[in-house]
Image (cartoon, rainbow, N blue to C red):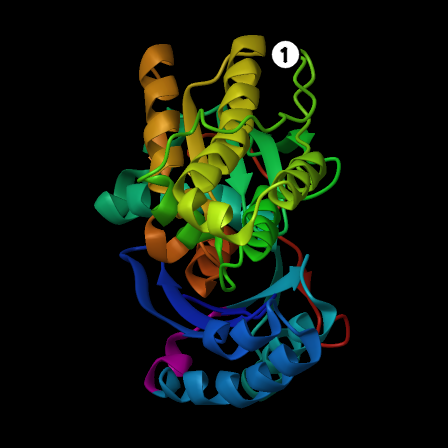
Amino acid sequence: MILAIESSCDESALALFDPSVGLRHEIISSQAAEHVRFGGVVPEMASRMHLSALPLLLEDFRNEIPLVTQLAVTRGPGLLPCLSMGLSLARALALATGKPIIGVNHLRAHVHSPFIALHAKDPQNFLINRAALLPHLSLVVSGGNTLLIKVDTDLTLTVIARTVDDAAGEAYDKGAKLLGLPYPGGALIEQHAQQGDSKRFSFPRGLPEKSDLRFSFSGLKTALRYQLEKMSDDEVKSDLPHLCASYQEAILGQLIAKTTSALDLSTYRSVGLSGGVANNRTLRLRLQQVADKKKLPLLIAEPKHCGDNAGMIAFAAWADCHLPTDQSVQPAPQLTVEQV
């Protein structure tokens, strides 16, 4: 039984995972509404809010703490002041209960998150069912990271490609800011784009060569700024749906093209999508079309597990070190209280 803590950015979260049944209890406290007036996350303010929220969330798990056999905590990447709050809570719980701590990489947890639903459907046969889906190509798309990762049959993770500058989620949020939309603006761009023509404006695709799997989004934001400088406020307002649709197409087009190229270059038995941007319905539909064409199953993290959450931290702490055969995987590192 694993109790997990997540505090890498502006979500305070705890979750309890039972391998025999799945996630028994998970809760998230979001700070998004508090950071809106600043147009982004303020690390110092976020860490103070974690300090207030985490003990309150822990109260909700009071009756389940005696069942816990291991603790799991996000150890990075993330905002250091925020990470320190979760690590401090894990350290305190370890001292109080004597339970070991597993440090979980936040991005590894995103990679594993599409498999949470697979486990919930059939916990007893999950390891066998997962083995049938490996090697697996994972597209992780969030505000801070955009990566293509191969999950091999022995659970080895290999980064196939990453962004050379900004992440797709950051491109969404900064593009929204240029368009005068409030933070976080990614969902608002998607909303406006549904009524727009994605071909009205032409925005560049970073690193368009098919053989280059790397992502790039910084030039896209610059192109949007130059386009807006040519337009009056009234023109921006009237063309907002078309601007959003064209801008979103430049982001999603690159994500889909790079993922398709990666599938062409190697053999995979499944495709996965995770991270905050994975909630984008157009991206889900487009990637489903790619998977169908390749005749591969597509695993997408559930909406509640796309953003930062402790459920994926708990699940990864367990799933990252279990195989259904005689193969052995190095277990996730157990940290001493001093290391934490």
- Residue at x 43%, y 42% (from the top left corner): 239
The reply to whether the magenta stretch includes residue 66 is yes
For the C terminus, which image quadrant?
A: bottom right
Query: Compared with residue 162, is residue 34 higher up or lower down, i.e. above or below?
Result: below
- Residue at x 70%, y 80% (from the top left corner): 44
For the N terminus, which image quadrant?
A: bottom left
Magenta stretch? 63-70
Residue 237 visible in the picture: yes
Snapshot quadrant of residue 30:
bottom left
- Residue at x 62%, y 25% (from the top left corner): 205
Side (left or right) of 175 relative to 246: right
Please name the residue that numbered disc 1 is placed on. 210
Tag 1: residue type? Lys
Neighbour class for label 1 at 10 Å: few (<14), some, many (≥20)?
few
**What type of secondary structure mainly makes up the magenta span?**
helix
Q: Nearer the viewer, residue 274 or 238?
A: 238
Residue 152 visible in the picture: no
Query: Compared with residue 168, is residue 10 higher up or lower down, i.e. above or below?
Result: below
Query: Compared with residue 161, is residue 307 higher up or lower down, i.e. above or below?
Result: below
- Residue at x 38%, y 62% (from the top left corner): 17
Question: Where does the image place residue 96, in percent across and percent down from the top left?
Answer: 57, 88
Question: Where does the image place residue 52, in percent across and percent down from the top left?
Answer: 54, 90
